[in-house]
């Protein structure tokens, strides 16, 4: 092959090189996208995430019931008067992730606490009624939650989050939202 | 010294024909027959061959298991029980595979501590060492995903905790975790993709192992004295000297594996993994497999989740920088009296972290885990850099053959003593 002599002027070869290179780069990105996107939750998984209805009537005071929405564990807790009082009277300054109990329940229905059931540290399921505050205690790395599902001590960074839900009537809730 | 010719000369017409088109027999001959190795290699140098055998064993038993295993959340657990009870010799395949994974890590850790002691990571073997660190990472990923496949309680919760490690990444963490799961929690899509990757990664390991051997055969083996090969008198041909030594050592190693497989096949596993995965209950005490325990202890020693994850990955990543953190130019620990003490301290630190990783994260255990975590990193960032500057090494022998023949590794009046080693 003959040697190319560098010229000061841009040549047609330079143009072709840049144009082809740019097209190839866009092409690579366009091909990479589907390979990454296929990892996302698929249509079936999303469809299975339709809202669920939970009947509260059979849940007696002091009981915690586990339900699943979108394959994710949710605690439905019927709190006793004492547990509610404890949650309400905790000063915000005692909380690593300060949030009043009133922000975590529906007004007038304070007995119902509905929170996600996986520890906000690395996702284990905390044990019911355990730990210093009789809320939950996570066996994995020792996070302690109170009767409002708020983190009190241990490595979990934030409170147990609330799933989207609303009351239909006194004894029925709908958890979830249309995807 | 040997009856073998140093270079391969094809004799038959067929071999000549092949050799002039693809010189593969010659490559094997020069790499594993005539290849010169230092004559003083001890049994610590047989673990490379053992690792190669273990990789093949994992691949062969794994392919057999995959013929009977069902990667579906509803069926995985019972398909493993099906392998154990119904498939002819299925129990043997599974116990070889599960215990083989553990013994694989036993071998790789011995192999690495050998390198740490004899300074095998130093110039000109840095790339060789870094390829080793990459193999370790791939092995860890493979073993982690393999452990998820039986879909027991430990599988499920191990997968949950480890994938959630990525949730600490700021901003994109939660999206990454959802993309790892293919759902809103560990579930069937997760199991499917882990199975696919668990099948793939060992073959990637195989590829990196080939690069590792290639990078080994450029400078040649290090040896217990750490000094370079100078003359032909310092070496022996790989075959028969190393082939015999490797085979003997591998046989003993496999006997130990058999002892586990036939007499205590579940010793290194966890009883909770014989309980099917249940997303609503976490076992009261979840621990990873023993070979992850030191790193798990480091993760839990640090109160902040993000920093804990960073420290855990850094504990492995720091190994890749070791060639530049150790400032001493004397390779072998045998000639470094103070380094030797710190080396054994480092071994104890690792064993200690391993023990703490299996204990609940509370009280004195946490305090100790913090102390040992500091010592772990201090080894790389304080002790090794300083030792090279402060320590006075012992006199080095003039040559490998001299050290072997006179049976005296040190204390002789030698001109070359304590001279920096160069490639
Ligand atoms: C680097 C090599 C490998 C390592 C370290 C490794 C590790 C593991 C581990 C720790 C388990 C869990 C064992 C248990 O508790 O039951 C496992 C399971 C499994 N592995 Fe591998 N593996 C390797 C290679 C392979 C290959 C190449 C295949 C397939 C071709 C494979 C297929 C399987 C299957 C089907 C299972 C599920 C059955 C079972 O749990 O026994 N593995 N692996
Ligand atoms: S997962 Fe709950 S404390 Fe770590």
Image (tube, coloured by chain):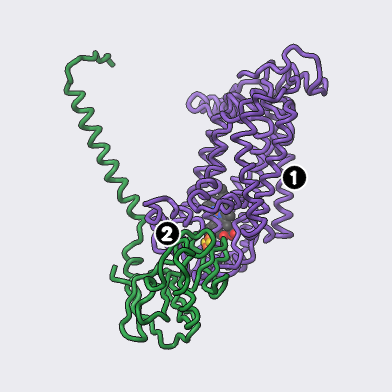
Chain colours: A green, B purple
Label 2, label 1: how far apart the Cα atoms are: 41 Å
Q: Are marks 2 and 1 in contact (CB under 8 Å)?
A: no
Place residue B356 in its image quadrant: bottom right
Task: Report the number of numbered marks.
Answer: 2
The disc at residue B181 is 2
| Label 2 residue SS | helix
Quadrant that contains the C terminus of chain B? top right
Q: Subunit of mark 2?
A: B
Label 2 or label 1, whichever comes before in sequence order: 2
Q: Residues within 10 Å of mark 2 (few under 14, many from 20)?
A: many
| Residue B355 higher or lower than A132, as above or below | above
Q: Is residue B32 visible?
A: no
Point 42% across, 61% down: residue: B189
Residue B74, percent from left and from top: 48, 69
Point 57% across, 70% down: residue: A131
Q: Is residue B365 visible?
A: yes
Foreground disc of the pair 2, 1: 2
| Residue A51 higher or lower than B287, as above or below | below
Q: Residues within 10 Å of mark 1 (few under 14, many from 20)?
A: few
Front-most of residues A65 and A42: A65
Quadrant that contains the N terminus of chain B? top right
Residue B184, percent from left and from top: 40, 64
Residue B268, percent from left and from top: 67, 57
Residue at the spot of label 1: B252
Place residue B187 in its image quadrant: bottom left
């Amino acid at each position: 092959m003959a040697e190319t002599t560098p010229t000061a002027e841009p040549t047609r070869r330079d143009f072709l090189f840049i144009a082809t290179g740019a097209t190839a780069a866009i092409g690579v990105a366009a091909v990479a996208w589907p390979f990454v996107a296929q990892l996302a939750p698929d249509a079936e998984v999303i469809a299975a995430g339709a809202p669920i209805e939970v009947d509260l009537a059979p849940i007696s005071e002091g009981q915690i019931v586990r339900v699943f929405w979108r394959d994710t564990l949710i605690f439905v807790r019927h709190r006793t008067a004492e547990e509610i009082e404890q949650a309400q009277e905790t000063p915000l300054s005692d909380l690593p992730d300060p949030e009043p109990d009133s922000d975590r329940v529906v007004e007038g229905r304070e007995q119902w606490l509905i929170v996600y059931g996986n520890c906000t540290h690395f996702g284990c399921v905390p044990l019911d009624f355990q730990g210093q505050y009789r809320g939950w205690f996570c066996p994995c790395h020792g996070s302690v939650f109170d009767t409002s599902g708020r983190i009190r001590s241990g490595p979990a960074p934030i409170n147990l989050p609330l799933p989207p839900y609303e009351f239909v009537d006194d004894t029925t809730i709908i958890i979830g939202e249309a995807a | 010294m040997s009856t073998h010719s140093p270079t391969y000369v094809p004799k038959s017409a067929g071999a000549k024909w092949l050799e002039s088109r693809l010189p593969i027999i010659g490559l094997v001959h020069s790499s594993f027959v005539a290849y010169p190795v230092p004559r003083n290699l001890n049994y610590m140098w047989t673990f490379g061959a053992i690792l190669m055998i273990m990789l093949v064993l994992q691949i062969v038993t794994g392919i057999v298991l995959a013929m009977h295993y069902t990667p579906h959340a509803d069926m995985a657990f019972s398909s493993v029980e099906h392998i154990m009870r119904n498939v002819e010799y299925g129990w043997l395949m599974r116990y070889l595979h599960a215990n083989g994974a553990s013994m694989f890590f036993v071998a790789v850790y011995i192999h690495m501590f050998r390198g740490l002691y004899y300074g095998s990571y130093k110039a000109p073997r840095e790339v060789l060492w870094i390829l080793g660190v990459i193999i370790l990472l791939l092995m860890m990923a493979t073993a982690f995903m393999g452990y998820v496949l039986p879909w027991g309680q430990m599988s499920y919760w191990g997968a949950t905790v480890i994938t959630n490690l990525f949730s600490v990444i700021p901003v994109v963490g939660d999206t990454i975790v959802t993309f790892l799961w293919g759902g809103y929690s560990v579930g069937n899509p997760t199991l499917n993709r882990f199975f696919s990757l668990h099948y793939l990664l060992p073959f990637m390991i195989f590829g990196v192992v080939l690069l590792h051997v290639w990078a080994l055969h450029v400078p040649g083996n290090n040896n217990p004295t750490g000094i370079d090969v100078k003359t032909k008198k310092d070496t022996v041909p790989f075959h028969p000297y190393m082939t015999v030594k490797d085979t003997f050592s591998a046989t003993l190693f496999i006997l130990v594996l058999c002892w586990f497989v036939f007499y205590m096949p579940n010793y290194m596993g966890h009883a909770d993994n014989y309980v099917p995965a249940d997303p609503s209950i976490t076992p009261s005490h979840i621990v990873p497999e023993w070979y992850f325990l030191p790193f798990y202890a480091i993760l839990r020693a640090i109160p902040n989740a993000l920093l804990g994850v960073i420290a855990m990955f850094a504990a492995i990543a720091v190994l890749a920088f070791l060639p530049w953190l150790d400032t001493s130019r004397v390779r072998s620990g045998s000639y470094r009296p103070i380094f030797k003490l710190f080396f054994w301290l480092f071994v104890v630190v690792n064993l200690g972290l391993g023990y703490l990783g299996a204990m609940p994260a509370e009280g004195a255990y946490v305090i100790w885990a913090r102390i040992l975590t500091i010592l772990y990193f201090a080894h790389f960032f304080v002790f090794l850099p300083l030792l090279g500057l402060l320590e006075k090494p012992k006199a080095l022998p003039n040559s490998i053959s001299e050290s072997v023949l006179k049976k005296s590794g040190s204390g002789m009046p030698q001109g070359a003593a304590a001279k920096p080693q160069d490639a």
